[in-house]
Image (cartoon, grey):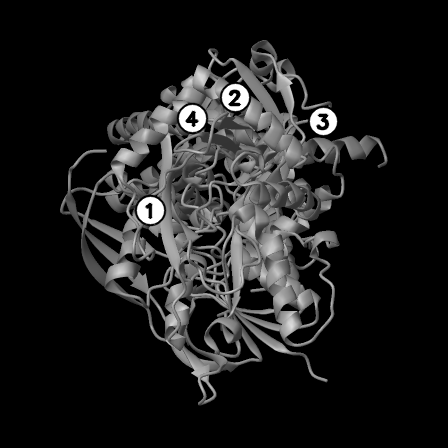
Amino acid sequence: MSKLHAIVIGAGFTGVAIAHDLALRGFAVTVVERGPIVNGTSGRTHGLLHSGARYAVNDQESAIECIQENQILRLIVPDAIEPNGGLFIGITDEDMAYREKFIEGCAACRIPIKELTPQEALRLEPNLNPKLQTAFTVPDGTFDPLRLALAFAASAKSNGAVFHLYTDVVDLLTDGQGNIVGVKAWDRATDKRFEIRGDIVVNATGAWVGHITSMAGISVPITPTPGVMVAYDQRLTQRAINLLNKPGDGDIVLPQRRMMVVGTTSFTIEDPDYVPVYEDHVQLMIERGSNLIPALRQTKERGAYMATRPLIGASAPGRSISRTFKAYDHKETDNVEGLVTITGGKATTLRLMAEKTVDLICKKFNLNIPCTTAETPLLSYRKFYVN
Amino acid sequence: MQNTLSQPKPGESYLLWLIKIVSGVLILAVLIIHFLVNHLFAPNGLLSHAEVVAYYRNYPIVPIMEGFFLVFVVAHSLIGSRSIILDLRPSPAVLKVLDYLFIAVGLFATAYGIWLLFAVINFGV
Amino acid sequence: MDTPKKPNTRGILDWFDPRGRNVGGWGFIINRLSAIGLTVYLYLHLYMLGKLAQGPEAFDAFIETAKQPAIMFGEMLVIIAGLYHGLNGLRIALNSFGIAVPAQRQLLYGVVGITLIGTVVFGVRMLTAH
Amino acid sequence: MTEEKWTVKFVIFRKKGDQPPRYDSYVLEVDPDEYVIDGVERIWAFHDRSLIFAHACHHSTCGACGMRVNDVEKLTCITKIRDVTTNGGSLKIEPLRNFPIIGDLVVDMTRMYAAMDRVHAKAVHPLSAAPLEGEGIRPPKDVPRNNGDEYLRLADCIECGLCISACPVAGTAENYLGPAVLAAAQLQGLKHNPDLLDLVDCADGLWRCHSAYECTAVCPSNVDPGWRIMDLRRQVVGERIKRWFVKA
C-alpha cells in the first residue's frame, strides 16, 4: 500500500510539529506555507518555555500540558533552548495574596517550585526589583522560535516531508461533493501555480485558520488576539522573570541571547495579516517590565513587535481535544471530508498539539500507529538546509 | 553552489601567509634603510649611470642589501598575486599551472636581478 | 522551490565597489589596488633597470625620459601606493597576531595620515630636485 | 516614538524564477521609529501580495530578516527607518549578496549553514564560554551556579549571513568559509578542538580574509567576526609553530 499523503497548510509551530509527527508515523507529507518557516505568530512569540506555573491557578489543564511538554522539549531539542529556569517574584501585598493559591496550584499540577528569601533571590539575580517580598524558582526556559521550528521541520524533511515555502494556498480542491482532495498553490518565489492532491488536508494556520476554512464554506470561531513584545539590548538576568500574580500585561521579562524581552498585551482584531505596533503598548512594557527589573529603564529598545494569538471563541463547535487547543475534523462538524483544522494552543505545547492532531487523523484512517515524537530527539535546525 | 563543502583543500596555508607577512615587514625595513643610506651616501640622487656604478662599487653593502630586497619583494609580490588569484576560485588545474608560472617568474626575476647587480658592479671592468 | 545555484555576486566588482562600505572596506580596496599597481611597477622597474647593463648611453637616455611630468606623476603614485601598502601591511600584520584589532579603524586613519604627509614630503623634494 | 509621520519611497528588488530582476517602488507613510521590516511587511500586506521576504522573530534573535538597505547589510527588524533614511527619502531594499536568490528578497543560505555545521558551531553556549562583560550584569563567577549546573545561553551568532554578504571576498571566493564560520571556530578554540586546525588553515579558510573588517561593521549581534578571525590566525600560527618542535 502506498503511503497516505497529508498536506499541511502552514509552517508555524503547529504545522512543522504535525509534519514531523505525520512523517514519523509513515505519512507522505507536503507542507505549504505562504512565507518562510514561522513568519507569523510562532516566530514572533515571546520565547518563554512555560513551566506551566503561569497557568497553575486559573487553567490547570494548560499548566499540566506545559510542564510535561517543557520537560520533553528540553530533551528533544536542546540546541534551541536556554534551560536556566525562571522566577516568580512577589513585590506588592496584592502579589503576596496570590502566594498561597500559587503554591497549591503548582503542587496540583506537579510543577516543581522552591520558595526563596528575597536575599537568596537577589543573590541569584542581582537585577531584580530589590523590593521583592518573595520568589519561587520554576523550571521555565527560553527558546529561539525559528530554531525550535526548524528542528521539527528538519526532522520532518529527513523523513521525506516536502516543504513548499513562499507558496500560498489560493483555493482548496474538491471532489465535486464538497469534500477536500487537495489544494491549489501559488509559488511566489517563481510565480508558478500548481495543484497538490492528498488524502487529507491539515489546516494548521493558527490565527488564519478562518481564511482556509472559508474556502470550503466553513467558519471557525477564532479570535485573533495580538499582543506586543519589546526587546531591550542588555541581558540583565539568566532566568525568565514572572510576576507572582494572575496573568496580566507585561508581567514576563525573559533573557534571550544578549537581550531582555518584555511581554505582552492583549486585544482583539479582525484581520491578522498586518498588526501595527502601538506606541502606548510599548510604553506599557517598559513600565511593567521595570517593575520586575528596574535596570531595564537604563537599556535601549532593540526591537518591538506584535504577534497574534489564535484564541478560540467560547462557543466553539466541534470536538474539543482540550480547552487549550482544538482540532476539528470537518467531517464531524460540517460534513466536509478531507479537512482537519487545528488551532489555539501555545508554543510550549506544539508537540502535544501535533500528537493529538495526528492521533485524530490516524483514527480517521483507522490506523493504529503510536506517536513517538516525545522520545525522538530532533535533528539540528541546520539540517533543514543541509542534507 | 555546493551543499556539502569540499574537504579542506591545501593550496594556501599559514606558511605562505607567514612568508608574505614576514617578507612584507622586511621590505619595509630594507626600504627605510635604503632611504636613509641613499640620503647619507648619495645626497644628490643616483641619476646617472656613472653615479650608480660608483655607488655600488664604493659601498658593497648596498648591492647585498639590494639583492635581499629583490628576493623579498619578488616573493611578496608573487605570494600576494597568488592570494588574489585564489580569491577568484581557480580550478585546481589552473592553480597548478599558475604555481609553476609563479615559481618560474620568481626564479627568473631573482636570477635576472642578481645578474644585473653583478653587471652593474663589473661594468667596464 | 526551484533553487537557483548561482550566488548573487558581481564578482571582482565587489572587491572595489566602495558604496555602502565602511572604513575597513576602504582600507581593503586601496590595499588591493596598490598591490596590483605595485606588482606591475615592480616588474616594469626590473625591466627598465636592465638599461644599467647596457651602458651609460642607454641608462642616461632613459633617466632623461623619466623626467617627463607624466612619468614623474607615475613615480609619485608609486610612492603613495608603496607608503600606503607598506603601512597598511604593518597594520594588518599587527592585527593578524591579535594586536590592536579593535583599533583597526584608528590605525587606518594613522596609515592614511602618514601616507599623506609622506606624499607631501616626497612631492616637494621631487619638485625642488629638478 | 512620536506622532511624527514620514513619507518614504521603498525601492524593492524583485525577481521571480528565471525572469530578469527589476526594482518596484512603493511610497509609504511611516513612523520614523518603525523598523524597516515593518515597512516591507506592510508592502506585502497592503500593496503587493506577490512579494516574498524572510523574517520570523522581529527582535534579532532568529537572524532571518537580513537585507541590504541602501547598500548596507542590515537586520531589518532592529533597523529603525529614522536611522537609514530621511523624510521624503528613499530606501533601496535588496537581498543579501553572495548567496543564491530564491526570489525577491529571499536568499538561500545553505552554504553558510553547511559551513557552520562543518565547524560544529554551537547554538547554545555555557555562559562562561560566551560571557557578557560590560553588560550590566555581574560576571558569571560572582553568580552561584544554577543548582550546580552552568548557565547556558543562545549563542551570539544568529547566522543571519550579513557578514558573508558584506565581505568583499566572499563574492568571488565561493568556497570561503566566511566570517561567521571562522568566528564560530575561534569561539570554540583550537586548543580544545584541534580538528578545526586543518579546516581553517587552508585556501578556503583563514587566508581568504584580507582584513576589510566589513563583517564586524555589519554584525548586528556582537560577534565581531573581524577580531575573531585575526585571533584565530594568531592561534593557527602559534599552533603550527609549536608543531615544528613538538610532534602532535
Q: Gap between marks 2 and 4, in whole Å?
A: 50 Å
* Local crowd size for mark 3, using a 10 Å CA cut-off: few (<14), some (14–19), many (≥20): few
For the point 42% across and 26% down, the residue is: C107
**Along the viewing direction, whichever of D209 and B48 lies nearer the viewer:** D209
**Along the viewing direction, whichever of B87 and D58 lies nearer the viewer:** D58
> Is D152 situated above or below C56?
above
Query: From the viewer's perspective, is the residue at label 1 or at label 2 nearer?
Result: 2
Q: Gap between marks 1 and 3, in whole Å?
A: 49 Å
For the point 57% across and 52% down, the residue is: A350
Whether residue D18 appears in this view of the structure is: no
Q: Which amino acid does label 3 sit on?
A: Asp
Can you identify the residue that label 4 sits on?
C107
- Chain letter for mark 3: D
Q: Is mark 1 on a helix, strand or loop?
A: loop
Can you identify the residue that label 3 sits on?
D149
* Local crowd size for mark 2, using a 10 Å CA cut-off: few (<14), some (14–19), many (≥20): many
Q: Gap between marks 1 and 2, in whole Å?
A: 53 Å
Query: From the viewer's perspective, is the residue at label 3 or at label 2 nearer?
Result: 2
Q: Which amino acid does label 1 sit on?
A: Pro
Q: What residue type is labelled 2?
A: Ile
Q: Do labels 1 and 3 share a chain?
A: no
Q: Where does the image place residue C125, in percent across and percent down from the top left?
A: 29, 26
Q: Do labels 3 and 2 share a chain?
A: no
> Is A63 situated above or below A217?
above
Whether residue C21 appears in this view of the structure is: yes
Q: Residue C18 carries which label?
A: 1
- Chain letter for mark 1: C
Q: Gap between marks 3 and 4, in whole Å?
A: 43 Å
Whether label 3 touches label 4, CB < 8 Å? no
Give the quarter of the figure containing the C terminus of chain A. bottom right
Query: From the viewer's perspective, is the residue at label 3 or at label 4 nearer?
Result: 3
